[in-house]
Image (spheres, grey):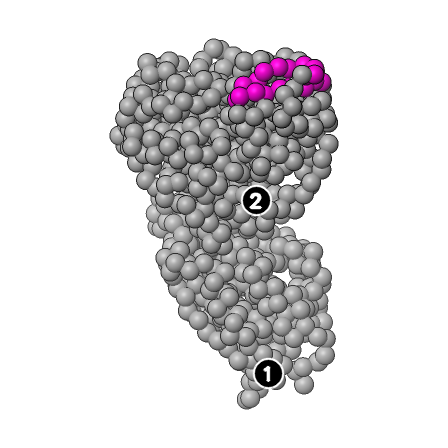
Amino acid sequence: MSSIVLRGGLVVGESSAEVGDVLIVDGRIAAVGVVADAPGDAVEVDASGCWVGPGLVDLHTHLREPGREEAETIESGAAAGALGGFTALVAMPNTEPALDNVALVSYVLDRGARTPLDIAVAGAITQGRRGEMLAPLAEMAELGVRLFTDDGIGVQDPSLMRRALTYAKPLGVRLAQHCEDELLAGGGSMNEGAVSSRLGLVGRPALAEELMVLRDIELVRLTGGAVHFLHLSTKRSLDVVVSARNEGLPVTFEVAPHHFTLDETACEQFDPLFKVHPPLRPRRDVEALRKAMRSGLVDAVATDHAPHAPELKDLPFDEAPAGMLGLEHVASLTFEALGSEDASPLRFFALLSRGPARIAQLRNSDVRIRHSGHGGVLAAGEDANLVVFDTETRWTARSSELHSRATNSPYDGRELAGKVRATIAKGRLVVNEGVLA
Amino acid sequence: MIGTIRGQNLLSLDNVSREAIVEVLDTAESFVEVNRRSIKKVPALKGRVVASLFFEESTRTRLSFETAAKRLSADVLSLAVASSSVKKGESLRDTIATIDALGIDAVVMRHQSSGAALQVSRYVPHVHVINAGDGLHQHPTQGLLDAFTIRQVLAERMGISGAESGSELFNGLRILIVGDIRHSRVARSDIAAYVTLGAQVRVAAPGTLLPADIENWPVTVVDSFDEALEWADVVGLLRLQRERGSGSFVPSLGEFTQTFGLTVERAKRLRPSTIIMHPGPMNRGVEIDSRVADLPAAVIERQVANGVPIRMAVLYLTVAGSKEEVVS
């Protein structure tokens, strides 16, 4: 394998950042600092004006394969991910059929191994994600699955969730919950509040999310099982999870880019591009999420990248499916949300790489298809999964230029700051000069 | 704020100015006269094509719009698509594209989903879209015809023409709206029209049938129907939207009638001049007692009759758009 030198970037470590070079040889980081003796055939990447850090890890990607290949495939999702700076993705199990057994998980792992990235899998908690019977968690854990979720819907039955936590605990895996009490959410299609009431759309109240967060914290306390809270969207949800985490309970949480960049007023034109569950919230919640990100309280940013075929987003708002794309814009949106504070480079990689890698247990995980290490420190000997993020480029998001098969991005036409210049995944230069290599 | 609906779409009354509403009411006034003629037809929209596209069952609104279009000499394409687009497997965009391909100037559209008319207006920007009711959102021509009816009744009592009065008769007018506000697109359009025209609006409903954020609405909530009976110059009743599941928001229809129905007893406590309105179709015996619906103070049939001139005015202003006099 050839060598790559990243020249003159701000190399961001776990607790400090310094301008320097990174030399990659044979899939590993060979040297960090001043690299004067790079091999003659090394590919040079100009990283000046860029942050160089561990490759990004997405805890929450809907790759749609099998079953909805018209919206996304593992291959197209991996390409979109690479352009977004990701070196590892966790594929969500709400495919058709759901990833609730060893055969289906193996299928996705096998397909994933043909992409340039590491593709991990989150398995379903219940059979068919129906919320009735436990899926074979132990068998899937044996394959290396470390996260389980019925995402798209939360496990509604508290007794089943309790049983799942008790069963999962000795397996060393984590249950990831989509928190919304569906009875309280009442089939609504946007946040319940002044906007929904004016628009005549049935609302999903914030309390539908918060009640399930509160319930699951108590179930964690009861069982000792670990829960990762997916896409928390309200200030109150954040407050209660942070306080539970401070108590020492094994809870973590992520925020999604749409929840920290868009508010409920985006639904005013009844454009189903802005329909998502949990829904876009009022501005005060958006600000609370951004503040929590800047304060280092958030464990991870995760995209909830949810491709949908275009005809489904031409349905009326209440009939259209929920979800929007995120892989190709999340790095820029996170960069913008963090602002230009001294701690921003460290926070950026904590939110998009180290935090999610730790939650997904991706660091040299013992999956059957061996994944490389992610979210590590930039030190000699580490697996070469890196991103070069250009902090100086400004650009305009265009849905027509996305690499996802789907185009349901809410950011078409938005001015973005910062752009992924290069992605090195498993030692290979996958993205260079902002395009697939 | 939309200053006039001339040449525009009519999707909602939320953002329509007082001047624009008065313009519609005044235009409708001249069409009332047309409807009294033996030959009830003017050539205003001759050669124009109006599609009426009803995804949701309706008899009176559809008939009213189609009558209005025909009296303006427009050609009417009438399509009943009374099933959800999902069940049909066709997207809203494809349905409207198909109709647009036939060559149309306007589409009058009713749909069970809030926002559907606005979505359609994005797909066919060259077509005038008139919302004939979208989900729980808006029913703008109902709001206009209700305002028109109130102005007409009050102007008649004073022996003046409605058009002369502009919006003056609404200043401080006390309007009480009762019933299922939460699920009512009529309430949303009525309140927007009345408040914009200068009326004071109070609402009475069981808590469950009020929108969750009623405190943000430009209305006052009264605790009981009874306490506002003597206050009201106008009582607007709403249909209990049982088909939208509002049945489960009250323990029983009987209890709803007991507490928020316009019973004979309550009707007796209204001032004799109080106008009683209902957008239809009525659940007689639920929100309104049958005998009350037939009182002279109830203008329910007049509302239906006024639907035609109002919809003529809306079609004329949006589609023809020009300012020339057409009625003569």
Relative to A382, say whether B293 is above or below. below
Q: Of all residues shown, which one is farthest toward the front?
A: A40
From the viewer's perspective, is A62 left or right of A54?
A: left
Q: Main secondary structure of the magenta part?
A: strand
Residue A344: quadrant of the picture: top right
Confirm or deny contact between disc 1 and disc 2 (CB under 8 A). no
Report the residue marked by disc 1: B46
**Type of amino acid at the residue the image marks with label 2:** Leu
Single out the mark in the foreground, 1 or 2: 2
Dot 1 falls on a residue whose secondary structure is: loop
Q: Residue at x 49, y 36 (%)?
A: A78
In the foreground, B25 or A393? A393
The mark tally for this picture is 2
The residues bearing labels 1 and 2 have C-alpha atoms spaced at a distance of 47 Å
Residue A433 in sight: yes
Dot 2 falls on a residue whose secondary structure is: loop
**Type of amino acid at the residue the image marks with label 1:** Lys
**Numbered mark located on residue A402 in the image:** 2
| Residue B31 in the image, given as x and y percentages of width and height | 61, 78
Relative to B243, say whether A18 is above or below. above
Residue B19: quadrant of the picture: bottom right
Task: Find the magenta span and give its range.
Answer: A18-36
Label 2 resides on the chain identified as A
| Residue A234 in the image, given as x and y percentages of width and height | 54, 30
From the viewer's perspective, is A396 left or right of A220?
A: right
From the viewer's perspective, is A166 left or right of A62?
A: left
Q: Residue at x 54, y 13 (%)?
A: A381
Q: Is residue A35 magenta?
A: yes
In the foreground, A208 or B204? A208
